[in-house]
Image (cartoon, rainbow, N blue to C red):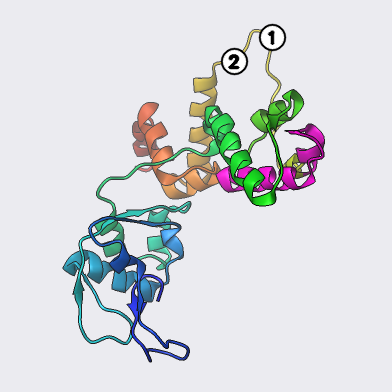
Amino acid sequence: SELFGYEPGAFTGANTRKLGLIEIANKGTLFLDEIAELPLSLQAKLLRVLQDKEVRRIGGKDTIKVDVRFIAATNKNLLEEIKKGKFREDLFYRLKVVSIEIPPLRERKEDIPELVKFFIEKYSKEIGKKISGVDEKAWQALMNYHWPGNIRELEAVIEKAIIVCEGEKITLKDIQDELQWPLPHNSINIDIPDEGIDYQELEKELLKKALMKSNYTIAKAAKLLGMSYDKFWYRLKKYGLFKHIRENTK
């Protein structure tokens, strides 16, 4: 009902007409976050909107012409979701006109200061505290943390820090409990020699090990390394490993 709207009497509690987000966004842009979570039944309806450029409210008889630009986002590999039968392939290709992969926060830590500033301003107003920034030790912790939960985790950490903060600046004390997460049980300890290592050779070898362990199935190898399919594919191309795959799958 949020996307498509409804007519009075469409269901229990529908006493008045409500416009859906698609109709409201007519002549504009609609952002669909976490598109992979959309049920298959709604995926089919959304596909019809994209194809026919018209929408029908729940309980309504008439279709309404709409002209909407859709932007969709997800943190899941939609190709994998398609294989599992959880996402429609036709909808995927309808949406995938221009695709942009945003790296995880740990790979773009230069964005952290601006994000922290934004969240401080946002939650200082909401909570009613005057927080001017973050002290040096807290900054070091924020910049060194791995951020497995990406921006949502950073937002939650800053929000909680503002709630418990006793001064004008967020301190290490305000965030350290949130940033203490255990290493996985199978964490690898690597001893780096004084002369250093060739990181690219190390990464290349890691890719080859993952391929071998997954019987040269790219999707499985990518999952072993916690990468998206597209990112793993890019690295295979970067290091010329498709020849390596062909040689081992003859």
Q: Which residue is mark 1?
A: 194
Q: Kindly tell me whether residue 33 is visible in this rendering.
A: yes
- Residue 156 vs 136, above or below: the answer is below
Task: Evaluate if marks 1 and 2 touch, with contact meaning CB atoms under 8 Å apart.
Answer: no
The 10 Å Cα crowd at callout 1, few under 14, some 14 to 19, many 20 or more, is few
Element under label 1? loop
Left or right: 221 with respect to 113? left
Camera-side residue: 161 or 150?
161
- Residue 24 against residue 227 in the figure, above or below: below
What's under tag 1, amino acid-wise?
Asp
How far apart are labels 1 and 2 at the CA level? Answer: 9 Å
> What residue is disc 2 on?
197
Residue type at mark 2 is Ile
Magenta region:
148-177
SS state under label 2 = loop
Residue 212 in the figure: left or right of residue 66: right
Residue found at x 43% / y 40%: 102
